[in-house]
Amino acid sequence: MRRHVIIKRINSVTCFSFSEEPSPVAQFIIQGTTSTTVSLEWTQPVNSGRSTIKNYVLKYSEDELVWIAIELKAEKTNYVVSGLNPYTEYTFEIKAVNEHFSSKAKKLKKKTNEAGM
């Protein structure tokens, strides 16, 4: 586990604070699929790493070589990925990010529906 120590001097008192890598999101599920969209939902990490979760990074890819990344506000716990190709399998991954670290990714794979369905 990675840790970050912050040392501050406040009114001649030295204060220490620690932050760590947050745990992965607690749940990452697919809520729905069309031929061009996948609706995703997740829950906050159980452990924020002693620092507030600042945002989430959602990435998706058809081939796991080229990824598209989307940065989402910490209050957001769902997202509809649109503009996808019909009947194509995608890999989705999400990471929680605190002030200093990002969590390990949670991954899902899902094939979009056939066109017209």
Image (cartoon, rainbow, N blue to C red):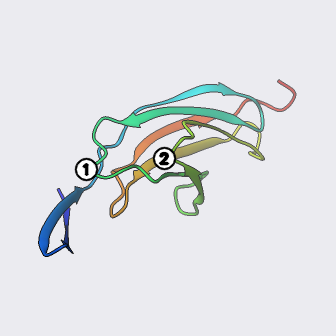
Foreground pick, 11 / 15: 11
- Relative height, residue 117 to residue 2 (above, below): above
Instruction: Determine whether the residue tagged by mark 1 lies in a helix, strand or loop.
Output: loop
Residue 37 location, quadrant? top right
The kind of residue on which mark 2 rests is Glu
- Relative height, residue 113 to residue 103 (above, below): above
Foreground pick, 1 / 89: 1
- Relative height, residue 90 to residue 5 (above, below): above
- Relative height, residue 14 to residue 52 (above, below): below
Query: Dot 1, crowdedness within 10 Å: few (<14), some or many (≥20)?
Result: some
Q: Is residue 83 left or right of residue 27?
A: right
Q: Quadrant of the C terminus?
A: top right
Q: Which residue: 67% across, 35% down?
A: 38
Label of residue 93 in the image: 2
Q: Which residue: 37% across, 61% down?
A: 99
> Which residue lies under the disc numbered 1?
50
The kind of residue on which mark 1 rests is Arg
Q: Which residue: 55% across, 31% down?
A: 41
Residue 114 location, quadrant? top right
Q: Is residue 86 left or right of residue 40?
A: right
